[in-house]
Amino acid sequence: MSASQVDPPLSDRQFALYVGGVEERSQWTVTTYIAQSRRFLAWLDEEPEEHGNAFTVAGRDETVTAYRDALVARRRPTASINTALGAVRAYYRACGLGSPEVEPVRGDRPDPEVLDRRARSRALDAASQRSARDWALFVLMLATGLRRQEVEDLNVDDVVLTGRSGHVLAPGPDGEQRELPLDIAAVMALLEWKSARAAQLGKDRAATKAFFLNQYGARLSADAVDAIVQGIAGVSPGVLRNTYEAGLYTSGFTQDAVCYRMGRAYPDKHKRRTLPGAAGCARPVAADGAGEQLSLL
């Protein structure tokens, strides 16, 4: 084994300390990079004999190039691939192997896909026929624009329900939590799931803080979130997020309010130009978008 080889790879904690401490990235970036590094390591495990020198300087660029090409072959969105590459580069830097010299995926960014009113109605009808968990998850993502990783990371304390109102707490780009209000449809769906969740856990209710659970009572993964949304509506979670963002613009939310709701440090200029209703954003609301919610119905 060469001196430059890293064995074993970094733990999540070590990588988080590097990304958040040494590179001074936001908590959202830390969480995203950890998730992406896990996917990269899982990909390496699929064919370990092909990547025996993955964690050497000599094998670094070849390995990461192969990973990029695999993501392209799986037809992952360009932005997702480049985010994954950013995380993998950081992982190699954290390992002391330098940053892989691999070109990002380039190409014209397509206009964001959204659900129109009819497609959204059909999707909600389909979701209502699923389990209490799947119904609550789908309604929540459509009502808040949460990323799939944010849905995986949700804990019970992050979902605040009081009577017929409520809100969800999610990380913001500055490390502070952002508060996303819920409409009555989302509140009712989440209350139904909370009851089903309690029944699933039984006496082991304190066993996990995770809000969404898999069939074994463990935290639902981001990949499972993706599969649920695909199974209901035939689209990615990103389409639900785009639909929510388009609704914010159509309702007249300011650019700063949209950034707050979407958990972004800066506006997405492409979506600002291409999402329905974005060009006409004019009606001012509170800068943090607090106290105003969109209705699913």
Image (tube, grey):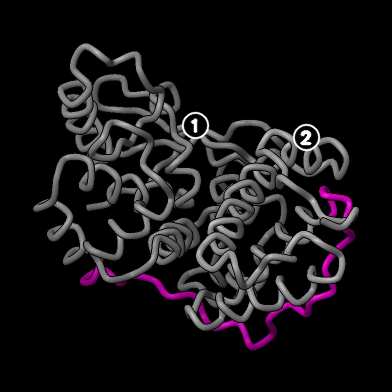
**Measured Cα–Cα span from mark 1 to mark 2:** 23 Å
Q: Do the residues under discs 1 and 2 have CB atoms within 8 angstroms? A: no
Tag in front: 1 or 2 = 2
Count of numbered badges drawn on the protein: 2
Apparent side of residue 286 relative to residue 291 in the rendered image (left or right): right
Give the residues drawn in magenta, as a range. Answer: 93-119
Spot occupied by residue 194 in the image (x, y as percentages of width and height): 23, 27
Is residue 97 on the magenta stretch? yes
Tell me where residue 7 appears, x and y as whole percent. Answer: 75, 47
Which element is circle 1 on?
strand
Q: Quadrant of residue 31?
A: top right
**Residue marked by disc 2:** 17
Where does residue 2 sit, x and y in percent of width and height? 87, 57
Residue at image position (49%, 75%) is 112
Is 197 drawn above or below residue 1 in the view shown?
A: above
Dot 1, crowdedness within 10 Å: few (<14), some or many (≥20)? some
Local SS, label 2: helix
In magenta stretch: residue 183: no
Q: Amino acid at mark 2?
A: Leu
Going from the N terminus, do you reach mark 1 or mark 2 first? 2
Q: Which residue is mark 1?
A: 169
Which residue appears at 89% of the width and 60% of the height?
98
Front-lying residue, 95 or 87: 95
